[in-house]
Image (cartoon, grey):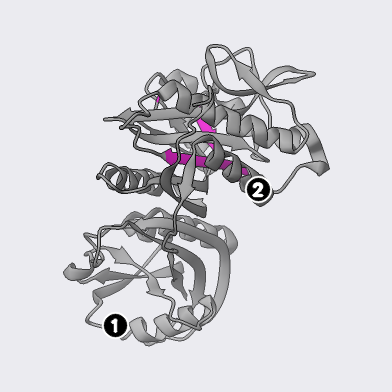
Amino acid sequence: MSEAGFSVPRPAQLRRFGRVFYPAGLRLQKALAAHVSQEGNPDQLVILEHDPVFTLGRNATPADIHMSDDFLAAQGVSVHRTDRGGEVTYHGPGQIVAYPICNLRGGREDVGRLVRGLEEAMISTAADFGVVADRLKGAPGIWVETPRGLEKLGAIGLHLSRWITTHGIAFNVRPNLDHFRWITPCGFTDKGVCSLHSLLGGEAPTWEEAADRLQAHLTASLALDLQPVRQPSRSVSALTWRRGSNGPEILMMLRVPEHGLWWQSVTGMMEPGETPEQTAHRELMEETGLTGTLRPLGLSHSFWVDPAIVRFPDAEPRFNTEACFSMEVPAEAPVRLEPLEHSEFKWCGLDEAHALMKWEGSKAALRLLEAWLA
């Protein structure tokens, strides 16, 4: 073996998503860790992008976040405590997050080698774009010497349970660096944070370009022998609303018990040959009997599909990618529910609708609609 990473190939599957809301990312990791822990199942490498979030590792304290909860909520930044190592860090759009969910049993019981392999992959990715990064003793991650001093380009935070790894790395392509000023990032008060964009300006790569290179280097440094993987299913949500006498009203429908018993607006799976827009119109008619004016919300996100909600013929974890829309319907139009899916409905104000919604994607779609209506 080399000093950085592993050299004996191990079967693995690569799953690359776009936006994943952080709580959905935690559920995703838990499901994949359980899968990887079963003898014979391949390791998993997940690459994605999170919504704006501060995550507190096991060594973090509330004092590491400098802004109030109300301020962060107004800025659209959430806070989550996690079981990974380290202090507080930031994830957000423009940052590549990679979760190597690996079984280190059977001769790979060396977390230090894994950490060095992750660092080596990030160092090589930076070098691909002309940036010289290196390790710093006692400070996991990768660092760049800048005119402002040492600045962190990539962070590492891992969790290990029975030799199964979760969490991973965060590599800054072009996140909002101002958000790092609201925390003590990774416990350092005398060092900064940088990104490829802050270092290279207009010459910086896109998220996709950098993710391509990081993916290749992680596959090599972790000696992953990539196997075929099932692609995510695709669905749409259509946040259905009307103009009420006291402001916008959101249609909320209660799923029947065998379909989960939670409140939601219109959702549905895409059928072969359909565009997302066609699916949204079809589902609106099938679930409610309504027609309306469709508007993209500019939000697509992915998540693990819980087999307790949707049954599958085998144990392989399933994922779905949802495109989000809003749809205005006539105020006076009657709602005709599909009784096999929903048992009741009501029109709600924005606050009540937000309180009823179960999933992160639905809440984010509602915030986007609320901003558009303001």
Is residue 100 something that shows in the picture?
Answer: yes
Quarter of the image containing the C terminus?
bottom right
Residue 123: name its quadrant: top right
Viewer-proximal residue, 22 or 254? Answer: 22
Q: Which residue is mark 1?
A: 337
Residue 80: name its quadrant: top left
Is label 2 in a helix, a strand or a loop? Answer: helix
Name above or below for residue 4 compared with residue 245. above
Point out the tag, 1 or 2, that comes first from the N-terminus.
2
x and y percentages locating residue 86 in the rendered image? 44, 22
- The boundaries of the magenta stretch are 85-100
Name above or below for residue 39 compared with residue 114. below
Viewer-proximal residue, 122 or 85? Answer: 122
Name above or below for residue 276 compared with residue 152. below
* x 48%, y 60%: residue: 365
* x 66%, y 33%: residue: 124
- Give the residue type at disc 2: Trp
Q: In the image as oriented, which residue stretches furthest toward the right?
A: 202
Distance between mark 1 and mark 2 Cα atoms: 42 Å
x and y percentages locating residue 350 in the rendered image? 42, 60
* x 18%, y 69%: residue: 258
- Give the residue type at disc 1: Leu
Q: Which residue is mark 2?
A: 207
